[in-house]
């Protein structure tokens, strides 16, 4: 259920502010009662986390931060690279996702390389923009 929500939000909540997004998340939590809610805690999305906490929805709320050290730090540079890698493994194992052209572009557009310690490191979002790509909002909603 959480994955369908993430996809739903990425599609329908573009251009709304953090308060409006938090309201939609709360509506979803109240109607679907998920076991957990994961929200990007970095950048502008941190405002959504603040709103959810302020409104009393912190109990099953988990913030995701992409910059910290990966759990498998010998393979991945940071958590962001790691969750993308885990999603790739999940897809290779036969997971089914919607046939959505925008999602497809997001999932295949991001490039990667290796750090000095031979860890998988994802392309920076600024570099994606320089290459003329949009940020992978749909792809990241599936993480």
Image (spheres, rainbow, N blue to C red):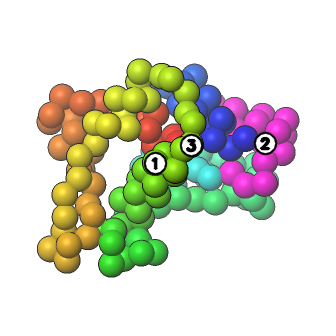
Is residue 29 found inside the magenta-colored segment of the image?
yes
Give the image location of residue 2, x and y in percent: 68, 44
Q: Earlier in the sequence, mark 1 or mark 2?
A: 2
Q: Which of labels 1 and 2 is toward the front?
A: 1
Q: Which of labels 3 and 2 is toward the front?
A: 3
Q: Residue at x 41, y 24 (%)?
A: 102
Viewer-nearest residue: 88 or 64: 88
Q: Residues within 10 Å of mark 1 (few under 14, many from 20)?
A: few
Q: Is residue 50 left or right of residue 40?
A: right
Which image quadrant is residue 36 in? Answer: bottom right
| Residue 76 - label | none
Residue beneath label 1, please? Answer: 92
Residue segment shown in magenta: 19-37
Q: Residue at x 28, y 42 (%)?
A: 110
Residue beneath label 3, please? Answer: 95
The image quadrant where one finds the N terminus is: top right
Q: Main secondary structure of the magenta part?
A: helix
Residue 135, compared with residue 86, is above or below; it is: above
Q: CA distance from mark 3 to mark 1?
A: 7 Å
Q: Residues within 10 Å of mark 3 (few under 14, many from 20)?
A: few
Mark 1 residue element: helix
Residue beneath label 2, please? Answer: 29
Give the image location of residue 52, x and y in percent: 69, 49
Mark 3 residue element: loop
Q: Earlier in the sequence, mark 3 or mark 2?
A: 2
Q: Residue at x 63, y 41 (%)?
A: 3
Q: Residues within 10 Å of mark 2 (few under 14, many from 20)?
A: some
Q: CA distance from mark 1 to mark 2?
A: 30 Å
Q: Is residue 49 left or right of residue 141?
A: right
Q: Is residue 92 left or right of residue 123?
A: right
């Amino acid at each position: 259920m959480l994955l369908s929500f993430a996809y739903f939000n990425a599609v329908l909540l573009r251009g709304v502010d953090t308060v409006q997004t938090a309201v939609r998340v709360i509506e979803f939590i109240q109607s679907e009662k998920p076991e957990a809610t994961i929200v990007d805690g970095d950048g502008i999305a941190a405002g959504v986390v603040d709103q959810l906490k302020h409104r009393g929805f912190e109990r099953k709320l988990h913030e995701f931060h992409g910059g910290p050290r990966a759990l498998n730090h010998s393979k991945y540079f940071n958590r962001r690279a790691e969750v993308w890698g885990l999603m790739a493994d999940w897809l290779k194992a036969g997971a089914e996702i919607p046939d959505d052209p925008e999602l497809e572009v997001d999932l295949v557009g991001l490039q990667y390389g290796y750090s000095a310690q031979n860890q998988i490191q994802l392309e920076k979002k600024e570099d994606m923009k320089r290459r003329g790509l949009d940020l992978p909002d749909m792809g990241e909603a599936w993480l």
